[in-house]
Image (tube, helix red, strand yellow):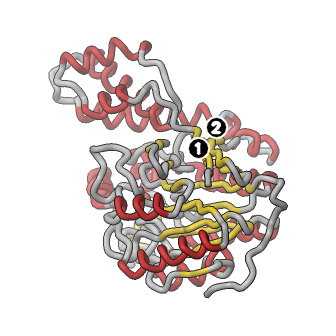
Amino acid sequence: MGRRRLSAAALAALLLLLPACGAKEDVPAVTSRDEPVTLVQATDLHYISPAICDNGAAFHTMVENSDGKAMFYIQEIMETFVDEMTALQPDGVLLTGDLTLLGAKASHQDLAKLLDKLREAGVQTLVIPGNHDLDSTSALSFDGEDYASAEGLSAEEFETLYAPYGFDQALSRDEHSLSYVYAPRKDLRVVMLDANAGGWCSVPDETMGWLEQQLKAAKRAGARVVAASHQNLAVHDPRFTWGYQIVEGDDLRALYEKYGVLCNLSGHLHNQHIVDGAVPEVATSALSICPNQYGVVTYDGETLSYETKELDVAAWAAKNGRTDAELLDFAAYSEEFMTAVNRNKTAAKLADSGLTEEEAALLADTVARLNTAYFSGAAFDLAPYEEGIALWRANGGNRHLESIAAEAAEDYRCLTVTAGG
Ligand SMILES: [Fe+2]
């Protein structure tokens, strides 16, 4: 494949083209009914293999024009995650899509090797693809100032590569997508729904039929259901609907309500958010972006609890003798990196605004810091941003800032669902 020289403009154009981001007889009784089941959900890892990425100038240009994912340390993020899951020993690790940055086969292959370590530690991982993972025509490798097209991965190859990560352990598999059902124990089933097989962000009719059969079977067996998908069933932000909400999202929510599904765990948005309702939906923020967190779900037969936990990359770095100052203070690095990426992007847009340099800097800093705070899902105080918010409003306003400000008092990091009857 021919190599091409990378320019910021070319990469920016490329980024705009990318979308946002067998039945088994026996159900294992993993724990006794007296012990809660623990599941972890991590999403939007956007892993890229060091075999196709040298962290050089071309990759820096791409990352610095993206949304602020801490991609220069993606290997360390994933190794920390594997270590934390090994210590936690959950009953399932749900990886809900966008496993890789641009869908390169090499990245999938090296991610599977990382998951092999978890398997050897006795932890069951469950994967589904996101919109970036299959048949990618955008896969790239990076070498110094150059980049080149890289080979993608087909759905069939995905199924084979990740066979030990859900497909081979499934209670039931759908024939028309990469969806399946996994049972961590007899009273709980996990639906891993692939919304990439029915066209763009859509579930085939046949999969909808299979899904209802699975929900009926769970009910007959007296098991409750936790569902998971990459894209969202609900609208989390009215600015992001097409390509974010699954085309059949409303039908899926109605179906899940009919069968008492406890919640849906999704991602894709990259920010942490929850839409409440009869079947609440969590959108867990991307593992690769500040604050680099995952969701921990416990279910004790009566109550399901979800809460986020931040990766401790700094502790992993110290334990492994790493001396890189950014790794040893990773939470601060990741926060400032994300803020700086977004500050620079807004500043560039304001270059010809007629504002003074100081005013433009305040506007860019305000929206970048608010965006970073918002992505974490934590409630935050708007007071420190008042001057910048007032200046934005005096200069035509900023839709993103207003959307963030309207939700500043909300905390989207926790959820409790009572199972009921
Ligand atoms: Fe996505």
- Classify 10 Å Cα crowding around label 1: few (below 14), some (14-19), many (20 and above): many
Whether residue 120 sits left or right of residue 230 in the image: it is right
Secondary structure beneath disc 1?
loop
Q: Nearer the viewer, residue 293 or 327?
A: 293
Ligand 1 positioned in quadrant: bottom left
**Is the residue indicated by label 2 positioned so its CB lies within 8 Å of ligand 1?**
no
Apparent side of residue 134 relative to residue 45 in the rendered image (left or right)? left
Q: Residue at x 38, y 24 (%)?
A: 365
Nearest the eye: 116 or 326: 116
Where is residue 175 drawn, in percent x and y? 48, 86
Residue ID for mark 2:
330
Q: Say which amino acid is labelled 2.
A: Phe
194 above or below 313? Answer: below
C-alpha span from label 2 to label 1: 10 Å
| Residue at 51% in and 32% down | 411
Query: Would residue 54 be visible to someone looking at this image?
Result: no
The numbered mark at residue 292 is 1
Tag 2, which secondary structure? helix
* Residue 417 placement, left or right of 30: left
In depth, the one of 360 and 297 nearer the eye is 297
Q: Position of residue 261 (x, y in %)?
A: 54, 59
Q: Residue placed at 41% from the left, 58% from the top?
A: 253
Image point 35% across, 57% down: which residue? 245
Dot 2 crowding, Cα within 10 Å, few <14, some 14–19, many 20+: many
